[in-house]
C-alpha cells in the first residue's frame, strides 16, 4: 500500500476526480452500457465523499457508502455499484494512484430466484386484448409483446432487432438475435405463426423498408422511424400492463421472458429444450425456474394444515 496516498479525492476540486473517471472509463474493456453504469456508480461514490467532507477515503468509507445505499437502493443495484468501486480501486492501485481500499469489501447476497412475476394465460389474454390494433401504435405494441411472450426475447434483443433478422428457412420463420453480452447475432428462435402474423400486420404499415432498419421503431413526432431504446420497449410493455389493470413493481418487460420460460416448463418442455430456447449459457439458470415451479407446487403446508385442523374438527 502507498505510504501517503495522493489526495485525488477533494470536496473543493471535483474536476480532477472527473478526469480520473474519464481515464478509468478508457481502461474498462466492457460494453458501453456497463461503462455508463460503472461511471454512474463512481460519481455517486464521489458525491458521498464530497458530502461527508472525506479527503482520504478508506475501506471504512466504502462500507459506510454501502450502508448509505442500503437506505434506498435494491440489493442488485448495491452489488453493481460495489463491483464498480472494487474494479476502480484495483485500477488506481495498479496505476500507482491510490491504494486498493476496496479489496475484500463484501457485496450483497443476491437471490438467484427470478425478481419478477410471470403472467397467467388469462392475464396475457387480457393484456393483448386491451391493445387497439386498428392504430399503428397498437399494431407495433401488439407485435412487440407477442414476440417477447412467445420467443422469450429480452428488451435489448427487441431494441437491437433489424428487419433482416427475421428470416424464413424452408417453411419456418426465425428471428436472429444479438443477446445480452453478445457481439453478433448468432442466436435464433423460431417464430410461431401467430407471432409472424402480428409482425407482418405491423410491418405492412411501414413504407420503403430497408433490411438494416430497426424491426421496431418509434412513431413519435420527434423520433419517428428511429430505433426504440430498451427504455422505450419497457414503457410499451408497462403501459399495456397498466391499461389491463396490472400495475405492480414485479411486473415489467422482463416478466414476459419470465412467462415464456415458465410456460415452456409447465407445458412439459425438457430442461435442455428450454435452456436452448432461453439462450441460457448455463443450465443452472434454467434449473432456477424449474425449482421455483416445484416450490409453487409443493403441498407440504396444506398437508400440515389439514393434519392439524382435521384433528381439531374431530375433537368437536
Image (cartoon, grey):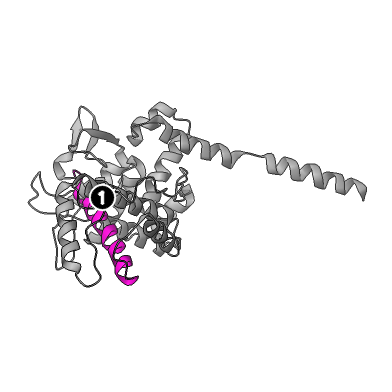
Q: Is residue 198 magenta?
A: no
Residue 241's image quarter? bottom left
Q: How far across and down, in percent of the image, does residue 222 sit? A: 14, 68
Q: How far across and down, in percent of the image, does residue 93 sit? A: 24, 47
Task: Find the magenta span and give its range.
Answer: 29-53
Please state which of residues 41 and 105 is positioned toward the viewer in this rendering.
105
Q: Is residue 33 magenta?
A: yes
Magenta region's main secondary structure?
helix
Q: How far across and down, in percent of the image, does residue 294 sit? A: 56, 36
Direction right: furthest residue = 316
The residue at 14%/50% (across/down) is 26
Tell me if residue 310 can be seen. Answer: yes
- The 10 Å Cα crowd at callout 1, few under 14, some 14 to 19, many 20 or more, is few
Please state which of residues 12 and 207 is positioned toward the viewer in this rendering.
12
Q: Position of 143 compared to 274: left or right?
A: left
The residue at 38%/48% (across/down) is 256
The residue at 43%/36% (across/down) is 264
The residue at 48%/51% (across/down) is 122
Tell me if residue 134 can be seen. Answer: no
Residue at which label 1 appears:
2
Please state which of residues 93 and 85 is positioned toward the viewer in this rendering.
93
Amino acid at each position: 500500500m502507498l505510504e501517503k496516498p495522493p489526495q485525488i479525492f477533494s470536496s473543493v476540486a471535483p474536476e480532477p476526480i472527473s478526469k480520473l473517471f474519464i481515464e478509468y472509463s478508457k481502461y474498462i474493456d466492457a460494453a458501453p452500457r456497463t461503462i455508463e453504469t460503472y461511471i454512474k456508480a463512481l460519481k455517486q461514490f464521489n458525491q458521498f465523499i464530497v458530502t461527508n467532507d472525506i479527503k482520504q477515503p478508506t475501506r471504512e468509507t466504502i462500507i459506510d457508502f454501502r450502508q448509505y445505499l442500503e437506505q434506498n437502493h435494491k440489493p442488485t443495484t448495491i452489488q453493481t455499484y460495489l463491483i464498480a468501486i472494487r474494479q476502480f480501486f484495483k485500477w488506481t492501485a495498479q496505476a500507482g494512484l491510490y491504494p486498493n481500499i476496496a479489496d475484500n469489501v463484501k457485496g450483497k447476497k443476491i437471490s438467484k430466484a427470478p425478481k419478477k412475476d410471470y403472467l397467467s394465460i388469462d392475464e396475457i389474454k387480457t393484456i393483448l386484448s386491451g391493445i387497439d390494433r386498428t392504430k399503428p401504435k397498437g399494431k407495433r405494441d401488439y407485435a412487440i409483446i407477442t414476440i417477447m411472450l412467445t420467443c422469450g426475447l429480452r428488451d435489448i434483443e427487441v431494441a437491437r432487432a433489424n428487419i433482416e433478422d427475421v428470416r424464413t428457412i424452408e417453411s419456418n420463420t426465425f428471428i436472429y438475435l444479438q443477446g445480452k453480452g453478445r457481439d453478433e447475432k448468432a442466436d435464433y428462435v423460431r417464430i410461431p405463426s401467430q407471432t409472424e402474423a402480428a409482425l407482418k400486420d405491423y410491418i405492412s404499415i411501414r413504407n420503403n423498408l430497408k433490411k438494416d432498419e430497426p424491426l421496431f421503431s418509434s412513431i413519435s413526432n420527434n423520433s419517428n422511424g428511429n430505433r426504440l431504446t430498451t427504455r422505450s420497449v419497457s414503457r410499451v410493455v408497462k403501459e399495456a400492463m397498466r391499461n389491463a389493470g396490472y400495475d405492480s413493481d414485479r411486473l415489467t418487460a422482463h416478466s414476459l421472458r419470465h412467462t415464456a420460460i415458465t410456460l415452456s416448463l409447465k407445458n412439459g418442455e425438457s430442461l435442455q429444450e428450454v435452456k436452448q430456447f432461453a439462450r441460457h449459457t448455463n443450465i443452472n439458470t434454467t434449473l432456477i425456474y424449474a425449482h421455483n415451479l416445484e416450490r409453487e407446487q409443493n403441498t407440504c403446508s396444506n398437508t400440515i394444515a389439514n393434519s392439524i385442523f382435521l384433528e381439531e374438527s374431530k375433537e368437536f
